[in-house]
Image: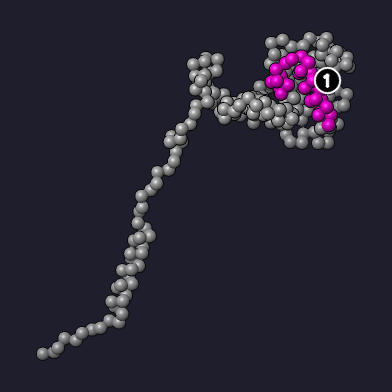
């Protein structure tokens, strides 16, 4: 009878231990751990900026999101190009003098700040697509001021006051003719929102104090 021969495989037990160790490492590496629940906006205690005026029909809180989105759309629809006065006869310095003069006119006639911002917007949009000489750029400012006042104010300055404050350089017919030209060149698109309107909304969301709002208005006026 032939005795059974034991076959010895080299390092078999050692290999088995190594494989088992690697499996444990791999199993530990890919073990699914408990996932931490992400923090969502629903868990935040967010204050509603329109909570105090929900029942005020004049605030139309139901449409505030749509109105803000539409204002951003108009801002993109009527852009003002950077450096639009480069190479023009009307220089940035002349524009600066004109804006300072319009600020004084707004204070003299005690008009709303929206009138000033809309006036400057009309001037920039007109100047960027039309060549205006040194002798007529103030006429553009006067007519734009009249247009903005008609749009924003209940009462707007009479023609005599406009001619007087402008040094009687331009006649009433020239002011009205330029007003008509601005309307035609801008295709009657006067609804471009101003920065002061966005400032009010952002201030309401942030619940800023009056001193912060006044500081924001000051910075916006410097940016004109």
Work out which quarter of the rendered image holds the N terminus and state it: bottom left
Work out which quarter of the rendered image holds the C terminus and state it: top right
Asked if residue 118 lies left or right of residue 50, the reply is right
Against 12, residue 47 (above or below) is above
Q: Residue at x 19, y 86 (%)?
A: 5
Residue 127 on image: x %, y %:
78, 28
Q: Is residue 168 magenta?
A: no
Q: Is residue 17 visible?
A: yes
Asked if residue 48 lies left or right of residue 141, the reply is left
Residue 15 on image: x %, y %:
32, 75
Residue 122 on image: x %, y %:
73, 24
Q: Nearer the viewer, residue 125 or 161?
A: 161
| Chief secondary structure of the magenta portion | helix
Give the residues in magenta: 93-118
Q: Is residue 71 visible?
A: no
Name the image quarter holding residue 77.
top right
Residue 59 on image: x %, y %:
55, 18
Q: Nearer the viewer, residue 39 or 98?
A: 39
Q: Residue at x 36, y 64 (%)?
A: 25
Q: Return the residue at label 1.
A: 139
Asked if residue 206 lies left or right of residue 1, the reply is right
The colouring scheme, among rainbow, by chain, secondary structure or one colour, is: one colour
Q: Residue at x 86, y 31 (%)?
A: 89
Name the image quarter holding residue 23.
bottom left
Q: Nearer the viewer, residue 103 or 181?
A: 103
Check disc 1 and report its element: helix, strand or loop: helix
Residue neighbourhood size for the residue with mark 1, other residues' Cα within 10 Å, grouped as few (<14), some (14–19), many (≥20): many
Q: Residue at x 73, y 21 (%)?
A: 116
Against 38, residue 199 (above or below) is above
């Amino acid at each position: 009878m032939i005795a059974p021969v034991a076959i010895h495989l080299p390092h078999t037990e050692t290999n088995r231990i190594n494989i088992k160790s690697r499996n444990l490492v791999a199993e530990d590496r890919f073990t699914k751990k408990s996932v931490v629940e992400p923090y969502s906006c629903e868990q935040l205690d967010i204050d509603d900026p329109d909570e105090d005026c929900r029942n005020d029909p004049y605030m139309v809180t139901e449409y505030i999101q749509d109105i803000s989105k539409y204002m951003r759309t108009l801002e993109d629809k009527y852009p003002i190009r950077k450096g639009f006065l480069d190479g023009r006869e009307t220089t940035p310095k002349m524009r600066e003098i004109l804006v300072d003069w319009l600020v004084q006119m707004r204070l003299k006639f005690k008009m709303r700040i929206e009138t000033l911002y809309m006036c400057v917007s009309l001037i920039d949009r007109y100047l960027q697509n039309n060549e205006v000489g040194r002798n007529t750029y103030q006429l553009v400012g006067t007519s734009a001021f009249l247009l903005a006042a008609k749009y924003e104010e209940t009462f707007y300055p009479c023609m005599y006051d406009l001619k007087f404050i402008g040094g009687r350089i331009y006649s009433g017919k020239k002011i009205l003719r330029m007003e008509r030209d601005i309307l035609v060149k801008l295709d009657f698109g006067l609804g471009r929102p101003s920065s002061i309107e966005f400032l009010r909304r952002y201030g309401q969301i942030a619940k800023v104090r009056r001193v912060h709002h006044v500081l924001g208005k000051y910075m916006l006026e410097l940016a004109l």
